[in-house]
Amino acid sequence: MVDNRHTVEVEVEAQAESEIEVENRKVEVDGAELAAELHGDPADPAILLIHGAGHCRLNWPDGFVRRLVAGGRCVVRYDARDAGASTTFPVGAPPYTLPDLAEDAAAVIDALGHGRAHVLGMSQGAAVGQLLALGRPDRVATLTLASGTPGIPGQEQPDLPPVSDRLAAFFARVEQDAQVEQDAQDARGAKAEQDAAAAREALVASIVEGERPFAAASRPFDEDGVRRLAARIVDHARDIAAQSTNPYLLDAGPPWRARLGVITAPTLVLHGEEDPLFPPEHGRALAAEIPGARFLALPGTGHEVFPGHTWDTVVPAVLAHTANRDDPTRPA
């Protein structure tokens, strides 16, 4: 377990982005450097965005962030360990645990000068949010959990529906393809270095196909939009292989579903009605186990990071949820 000792190196690269100020930061936690960025006025109430496994801070849509900022929030999005521009570790051997990621989130809040923050976690980020609210309740002003499940994903939900048949078939195919790809890499050897452009395009295509089965089946898949995002993610990553592998290998620590009833942070649970990984019953169960939690279903949405058609629902809900709650601000 890492501790909560940290320092922060400020890289004030304030830049205009549709009239929104963005400030880039580097947060030093025990054994890693995390890349973070603040959007909007630091004096406004802070919302900390915690992304899911295999993702990075860029997966939070820019337009979604801008809407939160326009609603009077300072939005903090950061790359977790093994994601984006943060420290990466050898593929297959992450030296940290899921509870460590919750400590990292607390360290980001502390190092950036926030006493507390409104926390919004997606998928694995929702698990991190639960652990943060349990272990560091003084850091969490409100909690918003998206596409989550109560307790350790895949271990504490025997009473809840499994992944969809479509997604299960995708997982089986990925496992088979991974071995084929490893054999191909061994055969290609040094030639892969000569084909950098082709390798980049293959990575982009892999991300696109990896996101496709998680999208809602009732809506057209935004392949062009996902492809543009995937290209940014590949270029942003220190080590895309580590990002795509290590977050799925983490020790989740002791079970915590039975402890969810002690969470005191006001909680909002958002869940896609067509989530193939955690069907909607997971979100409803999560809300039922946290006292006073409110559940909001998102029609036409899978296991996705707030596609554009959800913003008119999600943004007002998050702004209302984070309003008038002893708003946490960052001191000047």
Image (cartoon, rainbow, N blue to C red):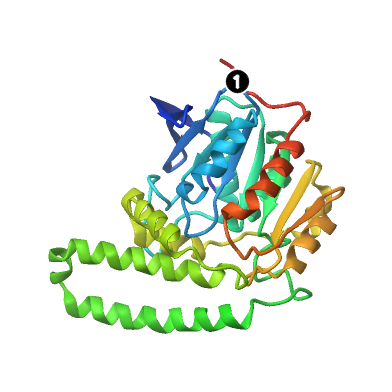
Does residue 63 sit above or below 174 in this rendering? above
- For label 1, the crowd category at 10 Å Cα-Cα, with few meaning under 14, some 14 to 19 and many 20 or more, is some
| SS under mark 1 | loop
**Which residue is found at the position 28% from the left and 64% from the top?**
201
- Whether residue 305 can be seen here: yes
Q: Amino acid at mark 1?
A: Ala
**Which residue is found at the position 60% from the left and 20% from the top?**
43
Where on the picture, by quarter, is residue 110? top right
Where on the picture, by quarter, is residue 244? bottom left
**Which residue is found at the position 38% from the left and 53% from the top?**
233
**Which residue is found at the position 38% from the left and 55% from the top?**
228
Image coords of residue 22 (percent x, y)? 45, 30
Image coords of residue 156 (percent x, y)? 72, 69
Q: Which quadrant of the rendered structure holds the C terminus?
A: top right
Q: Name the foreground residue: 112 vs 297.
A: 297
Judge left or right: residue 180 versus residue 47. left
Image coords of residue 265 (percent x, y)? 78, 41
- Whether residue 4 can be seen here: no
Image coords of residue 198 (percent x, y)? 22, 66
Judge left or right: residue 159 versus residue 243. right
Q: Which residue is mark 1?
A: 43
